[in-house]
Image: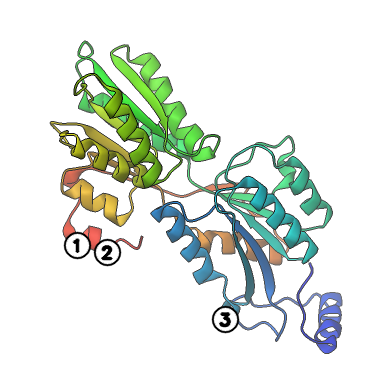
Amino acid sequence: MKKILLTALAVLAAVVGSACGAGQDLAGDSAEGELVVVGMSQVGAESDWRVANSESMKAVFTEERGYRLLFEDARQKQENQITAIRRFIQQQVDYIVLMPISETGWDSVLQEAREAGIPVILVDRMVDVEDEGLYAAHIGSDFRREGQSAVDWMAEAYPDQWAPVRVVHIQGTLGSTAQLGRTAALEEAAAVHENWELLIQLDGDFTQAKAYEVMTEYLDRLPARGEIDVVYCENDNEAFGAIQALEERGYTCGRGGVDVITFDATRNALLDCMNGRISLAVECNPLLGPLVEEAIRTMESGGTPEKHRYVEERVFTQDRLTPDFVESRKY
């Protein structure tokens, strides 16, 4: 494992230490200069969830804890992520942490990382590659299960199998693991429930501004105030944009009006849920920094981390929330 060493003496000490099987304490007791270098490629800062995810990583991977973090913001572009990974390889980092913007297009650059001997840890989303050996571990959420939780709630909320349930679906970044899983759950449920009608699928790109734009355009195209029962938003920021567009055009959001379903369950979304504007918030935990560090610690000690690690998550409705709980939310 390559280390970034500051002096020739440190290089010699590392060689001797390696020959003797010596290890290092990643909690901050490592010898001076023997920081574990982590190159991290983040999607961007498109949502409250993403910002919280980045902050979790930065809080864990500090010099005080034995790390040097090289953090790259891809600004929602896969080509920026690929460039960042190749830069990390040139810099001879110890580990690459990748939050992939989409699932496809990674085989070549991940092969380059493997040939350089640099383990890659996927966070949040997955990649679709022919060889799963191109990454060491994946840590994140089961997005298909999240979507299933949402459609299960819809089935309970609309038990009349003959009454129409009209759904506007605002999708996240197309091709991302979160979008694919949450979309698949809704589409499969709509195929089973003959009275569920997908009025339209809109590309919200996981941002408030885009969701507001596409929802506004859709509502303005309707000949009159159309009947909408559910707006299924694939993250909180999309829900905020959709709610703004709906309320500006006279719709009431919440039970008895338009049921807004959202994913992530950040503090602001839970506040809207507690106040009745959001009917269901499905949790997606962004605080993954400690779990990523666990995987790195395992590899530093010569072990093999769990290939896929999913975090436990909950669902929230108005009756399950209190002001104290919402206020205590860390993101």
20 horizontally vs 240: left or right: right
Residue 283 in the image: above or below residue 86: above
Q: Is 43 or 21 nearer to us in this picture?
A: 43
Q: Secondary structure at mark 1?
A: helix
The location of residue 272, given as percent across then percent down, is: 22, 49
- Residue at the image position 77 percent from the left and 84 percent from the top: 6
Q: Is residue 136 visible?
A: no
Residue 76 in the image: above or below residue 157: below
Kind of residue at badge 2: Ser
- Residue at the image position 48 percent from the left and 36 percent from the top: 179
- Considering only order in the chain, which callout, 1 or 3, is on the residue closer to the N terminus? 3
Would you call the spot at circle 3 few (<14 residues within 10 Å), some (14-19), or many (20 or more)?
some
Q: Quadrant of residue 74?
A: bottom right
- Residue at the image position 41 percent from the left and 53 percent from the top: 49
The location of residue 24, given as percent across then percent down, is: 69, 77
Q: Quadrant of residue 171?
A: top left
What is the CA distance from the residue labelled 3 to the residue labelled 1? 33 Å
Q: Which residue is mark 3?
A: 64
Q: Which residue is mark 1?
A: 324
Q: Is residue 176 visible?
A: yes
Kind of residue at badge 3: Glu
Residue 215 in the image: above or below residue 192: below
* Tags 1 and 2 touching, CB below 8 Å: yes
Q: Is 207 or 257 nearer to us in this picture?
A: 207
What is the CA distance from the residue labelled 3 to the residue labelled 2? 27 Å
Q: Is 211 or 170 nearer to us in this picture?
A: 211
- Considering only order in the chain, which callout, 2 or 3, is on the residue closer to the N terminus? 3
Q: Which residue is mark 2?
A: 328
